[in-house]
Amino acid sequence: MATTKQKTDKDAIARLARKGEEALHRITELPGGTKAVKAFNDLRANVDELGKKVRGIDRLEARVAKLEKELATLKRAQKPKTTTSTRASSARKSSA
């Protein structure tokens, strides 16, 4: 029974593939059809490229988050030094 279902699924997919090929051939026979098919192919390629770039954004966001944490840590480590030097310079100005 499972074999019959698989065969039916394969037949359905094969029929859809044939119909798709027939539709493409009909489109290319129309005036401007070749340009339309070329535009669709270019669009597909551009969408694929865009998808790759979007997947790369996740890695970049993770790197930015890591760098932000490191920067925050460095700022916390430098705060006491900055506060001390600010107080010392303020004291010098008021005594002058």
Image (tube, helix red, strand yellow):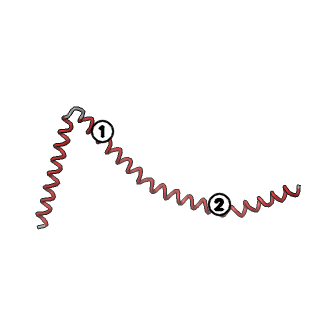
Q: Residues within 10 Å of mark 1 (few under 14, many from 20)?
A: few
Give how far across and how far down residue 34 sits, in percent.
Answer: 24, 35
Q: Amino acid at mark 2?
A: Lys
Label 2 sits on a secondary structure element that is helix
Mark 2 and mark 1 lie on one chain; the one further toward the N terminus is 1
Residue depicted at 37% across the width and 50% down the height:
51
In the rendered view of the protein, which quadrant contains the N terminus? Answer: bottom left
In the rendered view of the protein, which quadrant contains the C terminus? Answer: bottom right
Q: Could you say which quadrant of the image residue 95 lies in?
A: bottom right
Residue depicted at 39% across the width and 48% down the height:
50
Farthest residue toward the bottom?
1
The span from disc 2 to disc 1 (Cα, nearest Å) is: 52 Å
Q: Residues within 10 Å of mark 2 (few under 14, many from 20)?
A: few
Q: Does residue 68 sit above or below 29 in this rendering? A: below
Q: Is residue 92 left or right of residue 26?
A: right
Farthest residue toward the top?
31
Residue depicted at 18% across the width and 43% down the height:
23
Mark 1 lies on residue: 39
Mark 2 lies on residue: 75
Label 1 sits on a secondary structure element that is helix
